[in-house]
Image (cartoon, rainbow, N blue to C red):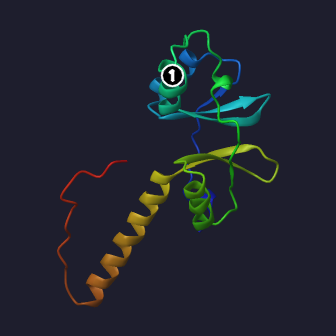
Amino acid sequence: MKVKDIMSKDVVTIGADASVADAARKMKEADVGSVVVLDKNAVKGIVTDRKIVTNCIAENKDPGREHIGNITSKSMITCSEDSDVHDALMTLGKNKIRRCPVVNDRKELVGVLSVADIAGEMRGCMDALFDGLSKSAGGEAERHEPSRPVIH
């Protein structure tokens, strides 16, 4: 399975010169936990709500004056839309990140891949497997939901 098959295509973006406060407002309006930072339409990085807290608020920087580009990760990690999902998951794990911008072969932003996207796809695969096994066993098997909440 390819990254482009499961990535989120509705990406919230912001210019590198925008303020942290502007980015936070965009995230709130779109109900998302991150924005992709663009510099002249090129992907500069991704900023999460956590990064805003740790790199701006906790350091007593003024979110209205601080440029979002200043708190963007210095090493830009992206995934190719044509990458295998397993390879992308290994990249996320190796770099200890939960999401990354997805680019096409021209390095244009086409989406964002998150661990939640991958987990959702895995859940769908497990449900299909469960249904198939249930039918082959000649009956309906009982499903058990997690005993504690699943965090998305």
Q: Quadrant of residue 127?
A: bottom left
Relative depth, front residue between 129 and 113: 113
Q: What is the number of callouts on the image? A: 1
Residue 71 coordinates in the image, percent (x, y): 62, 27
In front: 35, or 48? 48
Residue located farthest toward the front when viewing the structure as drawn: 59
SS for callout 1: helix
The residue depicted at 37 percent of the width and 71 percent of the height is 126
Instruction: Give the crowd class for mark 1: few <14, some 14-19, many >=20 residues within 10 Å.
Output: many
Q: Is residue 112 above or below residue 92?
A: above
Q: Quadrant of residue 105?
A: bottom right
Residue at screen point 55% across, 10% down: 62
| Circle 1: residue type | Ala
Where is residue 26? Give x, y as percent. 53, 23
- Seen from the viewer's position, the closer of residues 46 and 139 is 46
Q: Is residue 133 above or below residue 105?
A: below
Mark 1, residue position? 24
Outermost residue on the right side: it is 106
Judge from the rendering whether residue 134 lies leftward or rightward of residue 28; answer left or right: left
> What x and y, as percent, mark residue 108?
76, 43
How far across and down, in percent of the image, does residue 53 sit? 47, 25
| Quadrant occupied by the N terminus | bottom right
Seen at 71% across and 31% down, the residue is 38
- For the point 19% across and 85% down, the residue is 139
